[in-house]
Amino acid sequence: MLNENIRAVRKAKGLSQEELSVKLGVVRQTVSKWEQALSVPDSDMLISLSEVLETPVSTLLGETITAPEADSLKVICEKLEIINLQLAERRAVRQKAWHGLFITLFAVTVAIFAVLSALHSPYLGWDYSKPETAVVGVLFHGFEWLFVKLAPAVLIGASAGMLMTRKRG
C-alpha cells in the first residue's frame, strides 16, 4: 500500500524517480525499491518524503483521516483531566518529600548543635602527646569548626525550604 501511494503521489506531482531521489538525497534505486515494495523508508525518510511530496504521512501510509467527533473530544478531555490529576498528585508527593527533607535537615542540625554545646569542645582537654588522640582531636575540631561555619546557612536554608514546601490550605 505504501509503495502504491508513493508512486501515485509522485506521478501526480509530475516527478520522476530521479527527481524525487535528488530532492530526498538518496539514489534513484532507493525510490524504485520503495515503489516495488522491496524496502520501506525509515521514519525520518518518511517524514522527508511527505514534505517533498507535500502529502501527509498518514496519506502515504494509506490511512483515512476523519474529523474528530464530539464523543472522541470528550474522551480526550477526560484523559487529559486524568493526566492533570496524576501530575498534581506527583507534585504533591514530591513537595511532601522535600518538606520532610527540610524538616529532617533542620532537626539534625539542631541536634548536632545541641550535642556539640553539651560536650563543650572536649578535644581541648585531650592528651595530644598520643598520636591517636591527636588525630581524633584535630578531626573533631575540624568538624566542629566546619559545622559552626555552615550551620547558620543550613538552618536558614532549611527554614526557607520548610516555608516554601509547606502544604497550603
Image (cartoon, rainbow, N blue to C red):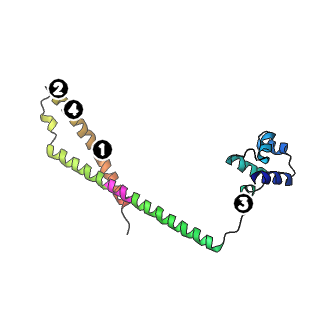
Residue depicted at 21% across the width and 36% down the height: 140
Tell me if mark 3 has few (under 14), some (14-19) or many (20+) residues whose alpha carbon lies within 10 angstroms of its own.
Answer: few
Which circle's residue, 4 or 2, is located before the other in the chain? 2
Residue 138 numbered tag: 4
Q: Residue 77, image x and y in percent? A: 57, 69
- Give SS at disc 4: helix
Q: Residue 136, image x and y in percent? A: 19, 32
138, 42: nearer the viewer: 42
Q: Quadrant of the C terminus?
A: bottom left
Where does the magenta region start and end?
95-102
Residue depicted at 59% across the width and 72% down the height: 74
| Numbered circles on residues, count | 4
Residue 150 numbered tag: 1
- The CA span between labels 3 and 4 is 76 Å
Amino acid tagged 1: Leu
| Residue placed under numbered mark 2 in the picture | 131
| Residue placed under numbered mark 3 in the picture | 63
